[in-house]
Amino acid sequence: MAKPFCKPKVFFLVLLFAFGMAAVQPGRAELQPWTELGPWASPLSPTEVAISWQTESPALGIVWYGPSVDWQRTGELPYSVALSKPAELAHVTISGLIPGTRYAYRVKLGAEVSPICYFSTPPEKFQPFTFLVYGDTRTNYDLHAMVTKRMARESAEFVVHVGDLIESPTQTEWRAFLNSGELLLRAMSFLCVPGNHERNSRTYYELFPLPQGGGRYGKQWWSLRWGDVLLVGLDSNLQYLKFTGLKKETAWLKEVLGEEARYKFVFLHHPLFSSDPHYGGDEGLAKLWHPIFIEAGVTAVFCGHCHNYEHLVRDGLHYFVTGGGGAPFSPLSDARTEGSVLGIENVLHYLRVSVSEGKVVVEMVPVAEVQAGEVAVLSGAPMETTELSRAACGVGIP
């Protein structure tokens, strides 16, 4: 029996066929499965965003991007920015973007190409927008993945994580967070504040580019304008701030919240008020920061730390505790603290915040109920809807 390719003519025809197939499938070698961590996008200003990812060893990479409406119409990403040198943890800053625009992007590393991802830039003037809030995703990363899978289907401009992303600041834990949150991280811009489990670690600041503010690396606390709406991220970890850090942060907070804005949203990890008998509220911070929030006309404060959901109102200011991102649940006391409007236990959830010209709507979106280790998926119909009007939000733009 003759062996394959033993005749020169047959071999030549097979080789010609192989080259022909390669010619009609251009770029096939570039579409290998993405195996890296990320990418994720951090909004820095109306015209600037940072794209990040992590690899096993230093590598060069290039980000291709363009307005998402153009991508949907043409399937092309016309612009690109490349890393200047190989890196394991890479950050590429893209400047000259169009304010108030949703972009599509993907990252190319050698033969690997990431899935299509998205980010949004802050507008310069007000335009309606939606953002998501969630927290306490440590320990049970399979549950975290359930939450982020649901969140990734939302039409939102960005998400804010209110701390305790991981159990402890090790590479294994960070990989678990990034892997379990990959669908969400690729779907919209990402912001966060530090929880106690981040332990003020250097890795937290290295992983996430954040808007400018103050403290460690200039982003331990931060602020960002989304049009004429003010977003403020705080560090509430007193054990790391110490007296000097808290004094600096509070002075900065007064100055930033003194700016005029249509709405003002504050994000921090530890709740000032809570009915959780184990974690509870932080009385010291409440005495210090609550009066500042009231005087500045803050619209709403979003916290985590307590692994449940609670909506509280103190002196007309709405506080939302959202600790349902996957961490082990904690119960609420039957004797609720002053101002507690609603408390819900054992439900994985996140918050959807819809901002329009005249009002803000906060919805508690349930993902699943967890009882005795059994997970029951829920429909996603909001368990609470709260409407905040501009008239009830104190200081605002006329």
Image (cartoon, rainbow, N blue to C red):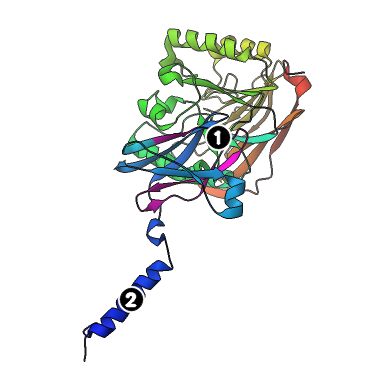
Q: Which residue is mark 2?
A: 16
Magenta stretch holds residue 331 = no
**Mark-to-mark CA distance, 2 and 1:** 46 Å
Residues in magenta, as a range: 91-118
Q: Is residue 59 above or below residue 33?
A: above
Residue 37 left/right relative to 379: left
Q: Is residue 312 above or below residue 181?
A: above
Front position in the image: 348 or 51: 51
Question: Element under label 1?
Answer: loop
Does residue 372 appear in this view? no
* Number of numbered discs: 2
Answer with the quarter of the image where residue 88 lies: top left
Q: Would you call the spot at circle 2 few (<14 residues within 10 Å), some (14-19), or many (20 or more)?
A: few
Answer with the quarter of the image where residue 353 lies: top right
Magenta stretch holds residue 115 = yes
Question: Residue flagged by tag 2: what amino acid is it?
Answer: Leu
Q: Position of residue 359 (x, y in %)?
A: 75, 29
Q: Residue at point 37% right, 59% down?
A: 29
